[in-house]
Amino acid sequence: MPTQIVVPDLGESVVEATVLRWLKQAGERVDAGETVVELETDKVNLEVSAPNAGVLASVAHQAGEDVRVGDVLGTIQEAPIAQAPKLTASPSIESAGAPSRAQAAPSAPADVTATPVAQRMADTSGIDIRQVPSSSADGRVTKQDVENYLEQQKLKLSSPPLRETTVSNPAPVPPREISALQAVDVSARANREERVRMSRRRQTIARRLMQAQQTAAILTTFNEADMSGVMELRKQRKETFHQRFGVNLGLMSFFVKAVIGALKAFPRLNAEIQDDEIVFKHYYDIGIAVGAEEGLVVPVLRDADRMSFAEIESKIKEFSTKAQDGTLSLDDLRGGTFTITNGGVFGSLLSAPILNPPQVGILGMHKIEERPIARDGQVIIRPMMYLALSYDHRLVDGREAVQFLVRIKELLEDPTALLLEG
């Protein structure tokens, strides 16, 4: 009797997923526990394994189709099947010489290293990942590399060979012919456009950002911090810190500790609104915004108040690696009571971050820049950083938000107080 492959529990508040790709074709043998299909959810990609060994007898949902928890994805037959159906899918890009999606290899060749997102794009577009040149120092093919390769192929197909022509004393073009030429130009531009379906994760990001704007009364307050003390402490301790813990002493651990100290002083920033009640959180799960190929993700430091500087830096490094490899789990992303986002790593000098619902506060870090400031009647140069706190004005008053941000500034400018109170 065939064994069903079903959509597993997708985690908290996640009930739907999209079939990303099948790693096995119908008719192929599979081992118990071997991954046969990959699903894309709002938060992470999930691998679904074969419940037992046998042959993949049927596929109920093709790549790109939406499924819900408990839906049957396919079946496994214990005995071999003489003539099993093959997976078919319409090609994503119709072009001369380009293979269809069904002909594309489901995974990267052994001699090519590619990110999961890049490999998925190559599979969907029907191209051989080995043909895509890498722009990375480590030789890994990225999403941007695949996009560049596809664009180059389209230009080759859509650009006719140029012919030299000589025109002497051209006659004026009548208005009707001008309109026709304009129509041709619009049509040519349409041929140079590309429509790509938004990934489930990008759709979720868009929906949640709109939700934050529409359901919360978002205000932002700004301040700046003199980072001299933190930078001097890092300079003194970075070598011994790395030797002892095997990780660099970065800025983020200082900010996590400063945020926790401020949250303890102003607990409304660590709460949320549920109907007509305020839920105060007496724990500190700090979300750290991390950029990934598929979009921004916010893994969470659980009980960050109990973590050392080294534990914070190690966990953030682990999150960053997982985000780039697409291996973050649902547990990594679940929950969070307050979020920190660092636009400074991309060169941002000042910005107003958007809330991460249902949280009521988010801190924005920015680029450290040497600026002249007045100190004790003298103009001196100091490494300064603009800080931004966006908050939900329904729960947090302006005075409370300003004092919260001032507290963070004080803790950053006095690392001794940060160690004691953070």
Image: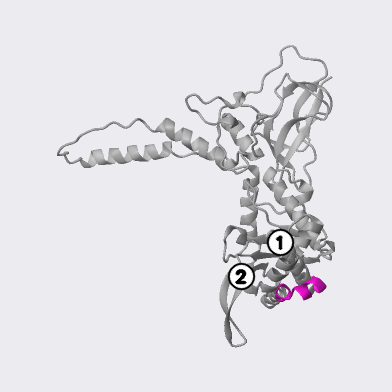
Report the residue at 63% width, 27% height from top: 105
Looking at numbered disc 2 in the image, what kind of residue is underneath it?
A: Tyr
Identify the element where label 2 is drawn: strand
Give residue 350's quadrant in the image: bottom right
Report the residue at 60% width, 41% height from top: 142
Vertically, is 183 above or below 101?
Answer: below
Quarter of the figure with the C terminus = bottom right
Which residue is at the far left? 169
The magenta region covers 410-422
Give residue 50's quadrant in the image: top right
Residue 311, position as x, y percentages in the image: 81, 58
Report the residue at 22% width, 42% height from top: 175
Residue 291, position as x, y percentages in the image: 64, 52
Q: Which residue is mark 2?
A: 386
Identify the element where label 1 is drawn: loop
Query: Along the line of sight, which residue is nearer the eye, 192 or 312?
Result: 312
**Which numbered circle lies on residue 338?**
none
Query: Along the line of sight, which residue is nearer the eye, 71 or 93?
Result: 93
Q: Which residue is mark 1?
A: 250
Which residue is at the far top? 82
